[in-house]
Image (cartoon, grey):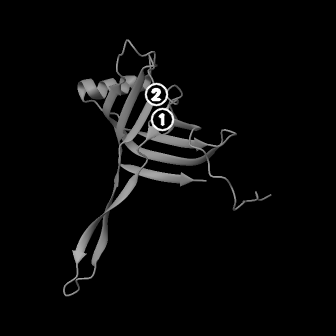
Amino acid sequence: MIPEVSLTQTPPVGFHFLATFLIGGLLPNPLDIRFQKISGITSTIETSEIKEGGENLFNHHLPNRVTYDNLILERGMVIGSLLNLEFNAAMSFMTFSPSNVLVMLLNDSSIPVANWLFQQAYPVKWSVSDLDASNNAIMIDTMELKYSRLQHLRI
């Protein structure tokens, strides 16, 4: 039976999501999947401007390449995380193990409705929220990654 598709379907909400690091590009890391916020899911086509000789009313814009923003993951500080070990190796010894990162937007039944695959991701920045004796807040790790390619996978 073919599922019925409604043209008035409500767009998905952005608070139910999951991110997983794929070990060896295939196996999901089951420990490092919960994040509070994910940002930087952006791709842009750079263009070159060409001025046409004799025509001063407009310019041509030709596509050059696709560029990507850094993927930024935020979560409560986790002790004993494999991901923390990878980030520490990168930041301390310049040892990198690029991996694929899969971000999934889930519906209210926890079924993925949209996915983004970040290929060959590696750490470029790692920060921790401020230590503040006047604030009773959870410590937040912010992890920033570069990657070679972004694939949008819509269902």
Q: Residue 110 in the image: x percent, y percent?
A: 66, 38
**Residue situated in front as seen by the camera: 150 or 131:** 131
Pointer 1 local density, CA inside 10 Å: few below 14, some 14–19, many at least 20: some
Q: Give the residue type that dot 1 points to.
A: Lys
Q: How many marks?
A: 2
Is residue 147 shown left or right of residue 52?
right
Is residue 22 shown left or right of residue 95?
right
Q: Residue furthest bottom?
A: 54
**Residue situated in front as seen by the camera: 113 or 53:** 53
Mark 1: which secondary structure?
strand
Quadrant (top left, top right, bottom left, bottom right) of the N terminus: bottom right
Q: Label for residue 94? A: none
Any part of residue 88 in sight: yes
Q: Give the residue type that dot 2 points to.
A: Arg
**Residue situated in front as seen by the camera: 25 or 3:** 3
The residue beneath circle 1 is: 37
The residue beneath circle 2 is: 75
In the rendered structure, are the residues bearing label 2 and label 1 in contact, judged by CB atoms less than 8 Å apart? no
Q: Residue furthest top?
A: 133
Which residue corresponds to the image point at 35% horizontal and 38% vertical from the top-left?
Answer: 145
Mark 2: which secondary structure?
strand
Placement of 80 over or under 19, stated as above or below: above
Which residue corresponds to the image point at 43% horizontal and 45% vertical from the top-left?
Answer: 118
How far is the residue under mark 2 from the one under mark 1? 7 Å
